Image: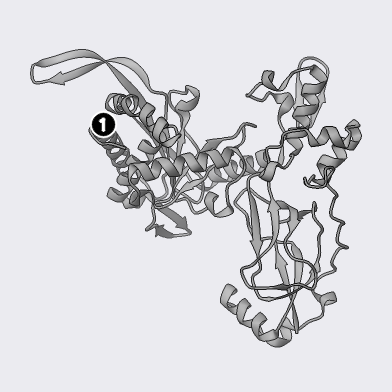
Amino acid sequence: MANYEVIVPKLGESVIEATITKWLKKEGETVHEDEPLVEIATDKVDSEIPSPVSGVLKKRVFGEGSLVPVGKVFAILETTVSTEVESLQVKTGVYVSESEVNVQPDTLIKPAEPEQSPASFSGTRFYSPLVRSIAQQEGLSFTELDTIQGSGKDDRLTKQDLLDYLKDRQSGVTKDEKKVIPTLETLPDFTQQVIPGEDRIIEMDRIRQIIANHMVKSVQTSPHVTSFMEVDMTRIVQWRNKNKDGFQKRENEKLTFTPIFIEAIAKSVRDFPLVNVSVDGTKILIHNNVNIGMAVALPNFNLIVPVVRNADQKNLLGIVKTVNDLGERARNHKLLPDEITGGTLSLTNLGSFGTVMGTPIINQPQTAIVAVGAIRKKPEVIETDDGDSIAIRSMMMISVTYDHRVIDGSLGGQFLSRIVQYLETFDINQTI
């Protein structure tokens, strides 16, 4: 028999730790390969961690409610040597001898004592240790805590839910009167320090620190160049106005511009595959799949980029369904780890906030990102067979920022021009 250490896997580029919300197996219980071991929660995703091998759960290193870093051992399985060696070789590609595998637990790790599973206040609802601690400090009764609406998985009460409730209770604001847009005072995990005068110091939350580091590294890694064009969106605006109400009634979903942008980008990538690349030293990796990340702004002003996979193989309806699903679950922190990784190119819709144009930062290791601005009515010169005329058109600025190490102005400009072409020749007779 041998011991196999199960670690918390990578859960996305900006996730470095996870909370164990529920153990799905007891110590001494048999576990099959790929069978879920535990439920975990992060700032972005709620998910299950499957067992990498078959065996018996020998040790639950952490209890429910524990915060465990990515890469940390959280369970020890007892399994046969042959199964252990075979699994390690298949999953890592590295040969491991029986002597290397069959070692005693004390030489593998020094496990912490399992924490006791926190008791829920109602007997049916889970509360994290942090939520319980805040509730105790604020003197909340168990009955009152159970009445607070949670935004987490299975109505789980998050730290921010509790802080919002406490703030509203103190100010006398009712649930219907709550503001949808958060202020600095309601941002999660921000520690404020009041200093003389009107200035304040707020500490970055963990996600904002990760975003900041990622952006700085991106600029340091690749030289950014941005090209701009203006696109006539009149045909698309008219088509959307004609179809959005019927689509909302039939599908109970919104018909936005984002899927149309993604469709045009995906078609253009197929025409210019050298923009769909990554750089590895002096090697250029040309991606076969067209996986387009779409930037989604979260209520706390942070950002997440779920990925529309194989966008070039989907029709417009398929892209609409995917975009709506990913966007909704992104805002509710219910994305799966695989849904925020693997993007080969990105789109950011600056127009959602009224911004006319922008120069976004590339999401490494990608080499290009498209930005679209607000659609505005403007007088434009229209060329016809009968001469030029001035008409009111729905115009939009669009840009592409690209990595000048591998994409020159010629390729970047042609790629952007092709996107504009697809948008301006949009088929207004198509149905959805």
In what quadrant of the picture does the N terminus appear?
bottom right
Vertical arrangement, residue 125 with respect to residue 81, above or below: above
Vertical arrangement, residue 330 with respect to residue 245, above or below: below
Q: Residue furthest left?
A: 386
Near-viewer residue (390 or 146): 146
| Dot 1: element | helix
Q: Is residue 379 left or right of residue 1?
A: left
In what quadrant of the picture does the C terminus appear?
top left
Q: How far from the left and from the top, in percent, is residue 19?
A: 74, 51
Q: Is residue 339 left or right of residue 88?
A: left
Q: Answer with the quarter of the image where residue 429 lies.
A: top left
Near-viewer residue (332 or 43): 332
Vertical arrangement, residue 386 with respect to residue 342, above or below: above
Give the residue displayed 71% in from the left and 52% down from the top: 17
Q: Is residue 102 left or right of residue 347?
A: right
Q: Is residue 341 left or right of residue 245?
A: right
Q: Is residue 189 visible?
A: no
| Kind of residue indicated by mark 1 | Glu
The crowd level at tag 1 (other Cα within 10 Å; few <14, some 14-19, many 20+) is some
Give the residue displayed 28% in from the left and 36% down from the top: 431
Give the residue displayed 72% in from the left and 42% down from the top: 156
Q: Which residue is mark 1?
A: 424
Give the residue displayed 67% in from the left and 41% down from the top: 207
Q: Answer with the quarter of the image where residue 137 lies.
A: top right
Q: How far from the left and from the top, in percent, is residue 177?
A: 68, 18
